[in-house]
Image (cartoon, rainbow, N blue to C red):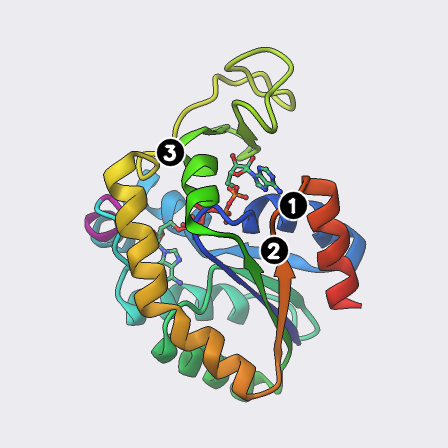
Amino acid sequence: MDVVVLLGAPGSGKGTVAARIVQQLGLTPIASGDMLREAVARKTAAGTEAARYMSCGELVPDALIGRMISDLIGAGPDDGRYLLDGFPRTVPQMGILDAILADCGGVLKAAVVIEVADAVVTARLAGRQVCPACKAVYHVETLPPKRAGVCDACAAALVQRADDFPATIAQRLAVYHRQTAGVIDAYAARGMLKRVDGVGGVDTVVERMIRALK
Ligand code: AP5
């Protein structure tokens, strides 16, 4: 099993880039935030616990997200190739991933961080619209749907994410700098980190990402 870890601040473009590269690079995406939102929507025990943290912009407990990721990867094929979008984002979660890989003889191929300044990600998140049905992501200015408020792919009504309001965005950014900086430093110290400039059009950032991973 191979794993690529995708890091970056909230709104840096992880989900947008992931959606465009997975097919080309033959990777299966696992987005921790999508997985948690699905558990919240299904009102599972894990989802109910996670919702308390997500609604105020805090990270859910390491053990909870670690269990969910481990179960998902464990249920997949031995030769799976995964793009982990948003996991790990604390140093203890790095340890959980190391243990998962050690258990199944898996290999961490790279950790990539998309770098974007806080002011830019704040504007991106404030204008983000998402499709609740097919999960497509838009932006009212930089990536608008063809018909305002309607998903191009499945025609569902677009919504704003519950954690994309100004106070929660600020809290999520503070949490990112406090808790994920150590993960970036640790992967850099292992010689596994690749940095991608996340400022520019989506196509440009996607090209940079593909170059970094080849
Ligand atoms: P999660 O869903 O992972 O949120 P996040 O990391 O905060 O990242 P986002 O999904 O907000 O942003 P993104 O980087 O994917 O940007 P996007 O591509 O959408 O996590 C949500 C919550 O779940 C967390 O707060 C936490 O509570 C919990 N959680 C998740 N993982 C966890 C973990 N491992 N441990 C503990 N808790 C966890 O782009 C943003 C906008 O910008 C869009 O509108 C897009 O159209 C636009 N855009 C993208 N790229 C560009 C570009 N190049 N130019 C212009 N606009 C662009």
Q: Position of residue 179 (x, y in %)?
A: 33, 69
Question: Pointers 1 and 2 in contact (CB under 8 A)?
Answer: yes
Tell me, for residue 19, which label it has, or none.
1
- Callout 1 secondary element: helix
Q: Residue at x 65, y 24 (%)?
A: 153
Q: Amino acid under label 2?
A: Pro
Q: CA distance from mark 1 to mark 3?
A: 18 Å
Query: Bounds of the magenta span?
Result: 51-55
Question: Pointers 1 and 3 in contact (CB under 8 A)?
Answer: no
- State which tag comes first along the sequence, 1 or 3: 1
- Callout 3 secondary element: loop
- Furthest toward the top, the residue is 147
Tell me, for residue 29, which label it has, or none.
2
Q: CA distance from mark 3 to mark 2?
A: 20 Å
Foreground disc of the pair 1, 2 = 1
Q: On the image, which quarter does residue 162 sit in?
A: top left
- State which tag comes first along the sequence, 1 or 2: 1
Identify the residue under disc 3: 161
Q: Quadrant of the C terminus?
A: bottom right
Q: Quadrant of the N terminus?
A: bottom right
- State which tag comes first along the sequence, 3 or 2: 2
Q: Residues within 10 Å of mark 1 (few under 14, many from 20)?
A: few
Q: Nearer the viewer, residue 165 or 121?
A: 121
Q: Residue at x 69, y 49 (%)?
A: 205
Q: Position of residue 140 (x, y in %)?
A: 52, 23
